[in-house]
Image (cartoon, rainbow, N blue to C red):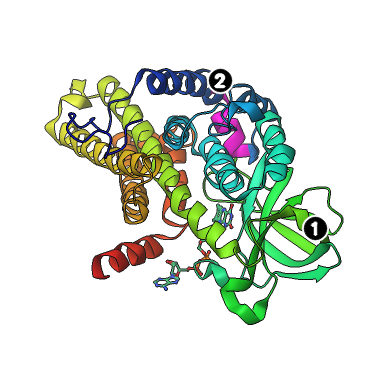
Amino acid sequence: MATALESAGAPARPLTALNEEELMFQSAVRQFAREQIAPHVRQMDEAGLFRKDLLAQFFELGLMSIEVPEEYGGQGGNFFQAVLAVEELAAVDPSAAVIVDVQNTLVLNALQRWGTDDQKRRYLPRLARDTVSAYALSESGSGSDAFALSTRAVEDGDSYLLTGRKLWITNAYEAGLFLVFANANPAAGYRGITCFMVERETPGFTVGKKEDKLGIRASSTCELILEGCRVPKENVLGQAGQGYKVAIETLNEGRIAIGAQMTGLAQGALDHAVCYARERKQFGKPIAEFQGIQFDLARMAASVEAARLLVYNAARLRDARLPFTAEAAIAKYFASEIAEQTASRAVEIFGGVGFTRDYPVEKLYRDAKIGRIYEGTTNMQLATIAKHLLS
Ligand SMILES: Cc1cc2nc3c(=O)[nH]c(=O)nc-3n(C[C@H](O)[C@H](O)[C@H](O)COP(=O)(O)OP(=O)(O)OC[C@H]3O[C@@H](n4cnc5c(N)ncnc54)[C@H](O)[C@@H]3O)c2cc1C
């Protein structure tokens, strides 16, 4: 992909114009989501469980290793492709989207940037083949104030002993590998935070209670319990005390993909609303013929397009190695706002049936709420945007 500098003098590439590879990838994920995931969405939402056979298909299709180099068994793609995948999956099932999001834009991203050659050799092929991963930063006492975490890491010979509890950990029910943030030097404050790669079978490590949630119910969210969990020093990701940098960098990027998740969700709600408005008749004609409905659909389409432009811009800036922190915050903030509004309006366009579980918009409305909460609440995004404005 051309960077802004390389393309100086050449016509600027429209943000939503995809190259051949991107188009093929997008269309493959769209087809997979519509044909293979869609038939199971309602059942998975009700059961609060993601199907294992679909997860296996994620691996087969390379959706769990988009940016991993081919030498490690991955797809050799870029961040923009991960964003496209999350967007397409979310239009059908935002739970499917967040599974792929955490694996690619948080865990693999951190491992590729901060991992040693040995760590990459040990973990990237497993993550590309069959191992789901999770990213464990939050605790009951530290959410927005993430670096106030109280999980401790104590040096013991050639290991660290980790003790504490993590909360709200996406993918934890299925994951085999966890990035766990713990403070190895509390006297140094956030500069003591260290990132550890913890395998599920490690003695002293347990996956606890699974949350019963409002939305994205098929995506697992669990507590983690660490009781003297022994992690070898060779499993420290980055340097001891640099965990805060690992967290900041990955979350800055991860939130672009949450913007993509919310954009896809809004597109899904809009598509359902357009179909229904064409079919549903009142006063002797399809409701799509009423200007009131047309203007609603038009406003929804304008919002989705604006969100997509913000998300694609942030993703392309990131791939071009240009500054993108404020753009990522704006994209996540805006996309989660419009996802909620668009899904809400879609429910209304469906009328009474929109309020039932028989139609998909009710679920998208519930799923939309998480966009304003995880990977930094809306207030945290606004704080980042304001900081850039005022600095
Ligand atoms: C379904 C789900 C999945 C999740 N997945 C993960 C995961 O995989 N890994 C992980 O580490 N975490 C995960 N989280 C945790 C998530 O990132 C936190 O819930 C989020 O960061 C908010 O933290 P909190 O819940 O403690 O809310 P709090 O930080 O207590 O915030 C409560 C309210 O106060 C506001 N607030 C707080 N501080 C300020 C301030 N300075 N200025 C203005 N307003 C403020 C917030 O915006 C919010 O409205 C997940 C959460 C959920 C619900």
Main SS of residues in magenta: helix
In the drawing, does residue 58 fall left or right of residue 129?
A: left
Give how far across and how far down residue 134 sits, in percent.
64, 48
Res. 79 in view: yes
State the residue at coordinates (41%, 55%).
Answer: 372
Q: Which of 126 and 209 is in front in this view?
A: 126
Q: In the displayed structure, does residue 228 sit left or right of residue 288?
A: right
Q: Inspect the magenta stretch and tell me whether residue 22 lies in it.
A: no
Q: What residue type is labelled 2?
A: Gln
Distance of mark 2 from mark 1, alpha carbons?
A: 38 Å
Name the kind of residue labelled 1 in the image: Val
- Residue at 37% x, 41% y is 315
Task: Say the numbered circle drawn on residue 281.
Answer: none
Magenta segment includes 43: yes
Circle nearer the N terminus (2, 1): 2
- Report which residue position mark 1 lands on: 231
User: Which residue is disc 2 drawn over?
Assistant: 36
Provide the residue span drawn in magenta.
39-46
